[in-house]
Image (cartoon, helix red, strand yellow):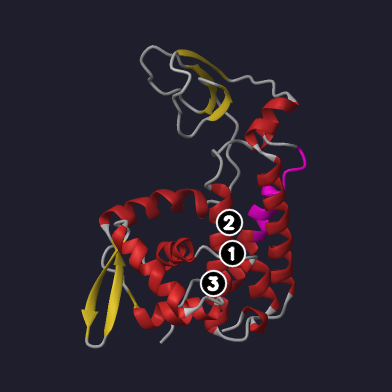
Amino acid sequence: MDVAALSPAVQALRGGELRVWSFVVTIFGDMARAPGQELSGAQLSALTEAAGIKPQALRTALHRLRKDGWIDSRRVGRGAMHHLTDHGRAQAEQAAARIYDFAPVAPGRWHLVVLCDRTRILPGHVPLAPGCFLGHGEPPEVPGALVLSGPDLTVPDWVRAQVMSTDLSQDYEAFQQALQLALAVPTPASPLEATVLRLLAVHGWRRLVLRHAALPDGLYPADWAGPACRALMASLLDRLGASVAPE
């Protein structure tokens, strides 16, 4: 389906060019994350075509995901069934904990970790300077690191800017506008359109929340659109319901 022929809500949530392989990961993460769940090639074709994705782009994406160990496929007659590998399922489950939790992170204990190795990265933490990381919750056990931990935190603006870059903040604002448009339009014309709207919303949200650590709102800039997006996402998914695989 040509992008121009898509409904306004689908176009808004789709945004610009989709990374098709990443969108396919979102589809599996939302619709076939449990062991034993599969999606047929025909179902994936219907879902991606309704999102304005060309068949060749889907074939390329499936080839890449098989090569990278995310999905596996089996032949059934003239078609194929696809499922997440153990690796893909583990990655999808880990991401789901962030994607589908719309409650704000509760304030609590903070920690500052200073590493001797200034080139090292500490996952799940905010880099404040080379080798210096801010985290939330219990501090990690890092041999040789200087660790400061406590309940109180004074957050200057320069730290907020480290947590939420200008580009990421602008992406949140654009996503907020897309969600507002999707909620303002009439009920989707079909179960397929409702499912595609849900998948595009989950995909857009996933691309944002996985780009930064899960931290209390007080650490982000005051005008951050994240809290508004959380509320809009919860409302939209509640309205659309669960994804339904095409017949």
The residue that mark 2 highlights is 205
The majority secondary structure of the magenta stretch comes to helix
* Residue 12, position as x, y percentages in the image: 68, 69
Q: Is residue 117 visible?
A: yes
* Left/right of residue 54 with respect to residue 154 in the rendered view: left
Residue at position x 43%, y 80% in the image? 45
Q: Mark 3 and mark 2 in contact? Answer it, CB < 8 Å.
A: no
Q: Earlier in the sequence, mark 3 or mark 1?
A: 1
Q: CA distance from mark 3 to mark 2?
A: 16 Å
In the image, is residue 24 above or below residue 128?
Answer: below
* Residue 205, position as x, y percentages in the image: 58, 56
The residue that mark 3 highlights is 241
The span picked out in magenta is 222-232
Magenta highlight on residue 60 = no
Q: Quadrant of residue 69 in the image?
A: bottom left
Q: Farthest residue toward the right?
A: 223
Q: Quadrant of residue 132 in the image?
A: top right
- Residue 115: mark in rendering: none
* Residue 247, position as x, y percentages in the image: 40, 87
Q: Amino acid at mark 3?
A: Gly
- Residue 201: mark in rendering: 1
Residue at position x 34%, y 67% in the image? 63
